Image: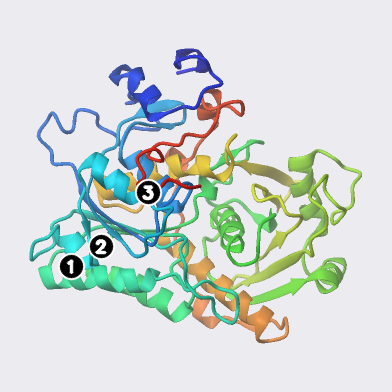
Amino acid sequence: MSAANLPHPLSESLSRRDLLKLGAAALAGTAGLNWLNPGQAAAGTKRPQVAAIYTQCFYCSHAYHILHPFLGPYLFNGKLLEPQCDVISFYGDQFTDRDLSRGIAKQFDIPIYKTIPEALCNGGDELAVDAVLSIGEHGDYPDTKYGQTKYPRKRFFDAIVKVMEQSDRFVPVFSDKHFSYRWDWAREMYDTSRKHGFPMMVGSSVPLAERTIPLELTYGTEIEDAVSIHGGPIEKYDIHGLEVLQSMVEFRKGGETGISSVQFLKGDDLIKAGKEGRWSMKLAEAAMQAELGDTKRGLFDPIGSEGTREPHGILLEYKDGFRATMLRIGSNGVRWNFACSIKGEPAPKATTFFPGPWGNRNLFRAFSHAIQYLFVNKEEPYPCERTLLMTGALDAAMHSCFEKGYAKIKTPELEFSYKPKDFNQFREMGKSWEVITADMEPYKDFVVSDPAPKE
């Protein structure tokens, strides 16, 4: 499908109505999307019935973006796909005058329940769904003393598991972003999923972004050092930067071994550590050049109109002796850069992760596509151990920053191994950006149906 196949004019928003006009002829059944079976419903196979549990649902919230591809056709890798699941119940933790979920529920005849158990049982006495979307991002929640928002992901998870235990039936669970702001809760959530044997997907959408400079690290690559860079706020974007990093380095020779120590540094201390060789300034420069293409600028020079923001970094030392670094440079919220050195190759390998012409919101199509794979196939699209490891690394980094005076923290609890999994079929390779272009307005589906629409 190309931009020429879309309704015109191209400057108009790509709305749900536009997508529906494209019709079933655009549905994909091609290589790279081969887990989809458009004839599944016709063959009599039951589509997964899904409960959606969320903090708040408003325009551009995570709940809004993740639900969008579950409620109608969506673009992934330039192909128009139909959702493979049916959302049949809602639970909202908070409602404000920005809420869209009441309008969505009315439009799609989806009941909103007052409790999580009621939503999972669809008003009955036993688990009545085949999968659960748990979207614990956005909303009015307090922060910890480390600046971590106390999103109720663990509370949501515990309520979900309790219903499954009482019904003696366990179904796939998606939990948005990292497991929890507390490591002990994160580990408990993971262990509970393994104990009961239900697949789980957690994590960031950014590893699914297009790599603007082709860079594939296959299993067994002898990576010697690596750096990822983002431009967003501390903690909330650090988890994305860490997952970009880990989604690449987990393929190194010998496989993932876990992390032995974590240290948070900022400003002059970070720069000093770089000059001492504790992290690679050369790789960081290569990562920034992949984005900006300017070989003459200093690593921490102001970038365009971004102004100045104190840089910070999270230094990781792995059990196998490997090291890697996540940096925050500048203030561009769609900056996702990566570079690594490979044994025997003189020059660094670098790329940028491009989320799309509408910024990070574009990635939720690929993300929801992977979530639907989890629900349909009852198989994790990539290891949730990746996010567990980065959840622990982030929590340790916050303690290093706010409690330990930027000291290096030993992390024996993070010295666990896992095997990576090729997740290429869930990545956006850039074909969608031939359809969704920068001159098109982002969609605003469901906004008009809101009881009191506000942005």
- Which residue occupies the extreme front position in the image? 452
Residue where numbered disc 1 is placed = 164
Q: Quadrant of the N terminus?
A: top left
Amino acid found under the numbered disc labelled 1: Met
- Circle 2 sits on which residue? 198
Say which element carries label 2.
loop
CB-based contact (under 8 Å), mark 1 and mark 2:
yes
Mark number, residue 294: none
Kind of residue indicated by mark 3: Leu
Query: What residue is shown at x 33% (from left), y 50% (from top)?
Result: 101
Q: Which tag, 1 or 2, sits closer to the chain's start?
A: 1
Question: 37 or 80, which is in the foreground?
Answer: 80
Marking on residue 100 = 3
Horizontal and vertical percent position of residue 233: 65, 62
Residue 94 lies, in percent from the top left, at 37, 64
> Badge 2, how many Cα within 10 Å: few under 14, some, many 20+?
some
Label 3, label 2: how far apart the Cα atoms are: 31 Å
Asked which colour scheme the image uses, the reply is: rainbow
Describe residue 159's horizontal placement relative to residue 141 as left or right: left
Asked if residue 96 lies left or right of residue 48, the reply is: right
In the depicted structure, whether residue 89 falls above or below residue 212: below
